Amino acid sequence: MPSLADLQTAFAAAVLGESSEAAEIARTVRGSGLAPTQRVQVYRNAVWVRLKDALADIYPVLRRLVGDACFDGVAAELIRRYPPRVGYLNPFGEQMAGIVAGLPVLAGLPYLPDVARLEWAWHQAFHAAKAPYLPAQAFADVPVEQQHAIGLRLQPGASLLSSSYPIGRIFEVNQPDYQGDDTVSLDQGGEFLLIIRRGFNVRVEPLSAGEYALLAALAASAPLGEALLAAVGAQPDCPVGAVLARHVAAATFTALQAAGDTAPA
């Protein structure tokens, strides 16, 4: 007789895997009423519906762009390849961009993977832990000659995205409460974006090339001096002082840290 652990593993495979696995576990089911395969199918249907609903909650814009039927098929492919591995669903669905990019049926919509990346970043920001903001006074406590060597830690859940397509605009016009011109021209080119929670709201903020380079360098734990050089390298006319001051005032950062360190200083 199989152990409880073996039965649980087999049942999970039956619910999330192929129908042949469901038929195998059904052989262990006893009871009157529904046939064993039907009993297993009840659980299988309920789990798949819940997982598809969870993906639809994370990727509403993607779902709107491809339609319900197509999204249902894409979601099923993700569930088959990457079923949830923990008891809560917040980490589930991260691989959507890769799934979308690999489906030939969606090859004619090359911006969709970046839309999926944006929506996952939004999801991460929404569920990120609350953190204190970095006060401007913190810089005054660092000697001027040492400020080039400090790092700046971005808020938890903040993400930086660059795309060859106007994904910020696509995301904006596909919001339920959007009113106005919903025209999107792919000819307008790409975008640099910061996705971050400010207060209780998640923001999708457009960035200049220099601003993006600055924040990307800081996110990679580069020292401030190096990040400022990266900004000017990406955009020679970038007003780095004003950009840095604006992000400090907007609470983009949570703490100073030693350059190269991933923990707050």
Image (cartoon, rainbow, N blue to C red):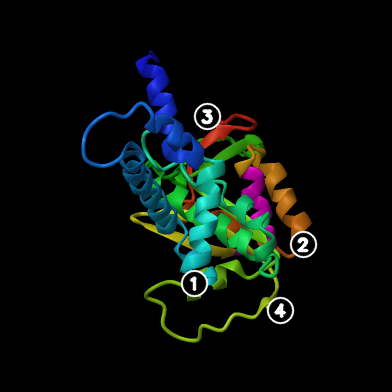
The disc labelled 1 sits on which kind of residue?
Answer: Glu
Above or below, comparing residue 81 to residue 109 in the picture = above
Q: Residue at x 67, y 38 (%)?
A: 222
Can residue 90 be seen here? yes
Query: From mark 4 to mark 1, how far is it between C-alphas?
Result: 17 Å
Residue occupied by mark 3: 263
Q: Which residues are magenta?
A: 207-218
The disc labelled 3 sits on which kind of residue?
Answer: Ala
Badge 2 density bin: few <14, some 14–19, many ≥20, Cα 10 Å = few
Q: Say whether disc 3 or disc 4 marks the residue closer to the N-terminus.
A: 4
In percent of width and height, residue 163 lies at 67, 62
Front: mark 4 or 2: 4
Query: From mark 1 to mark 3, how far is it between C-alphas?
Result: 34 Å
The secondary element bearing badge 2 is classed as: loop
Query: From mark 4 to mark 2, how far is it between C-alphas?
Result: 24 Å
Q: Are marks 4 and 1 in contact (CB under 8 Å)?
A: no
Q: Are marks 1 and 3 in contact (CB under 8 Å)?
A: no
Residue occupied by mark 4: 187
The secondary element bearing badge 1 is classed as: helix
The quarter holding residue 234 reads: bottom right
Q: Residue at x 72, y 43 (%)?
A: 226
Q: Say whether disc 2 or disc 1 marks the residue closer to the N-terminus.
A: 1
Query: From mark 3 to mark 4, how far is it between C-alphas?
Result: 41 Å
Above or below, comparing residue 190 to residue 150 in the picture = below
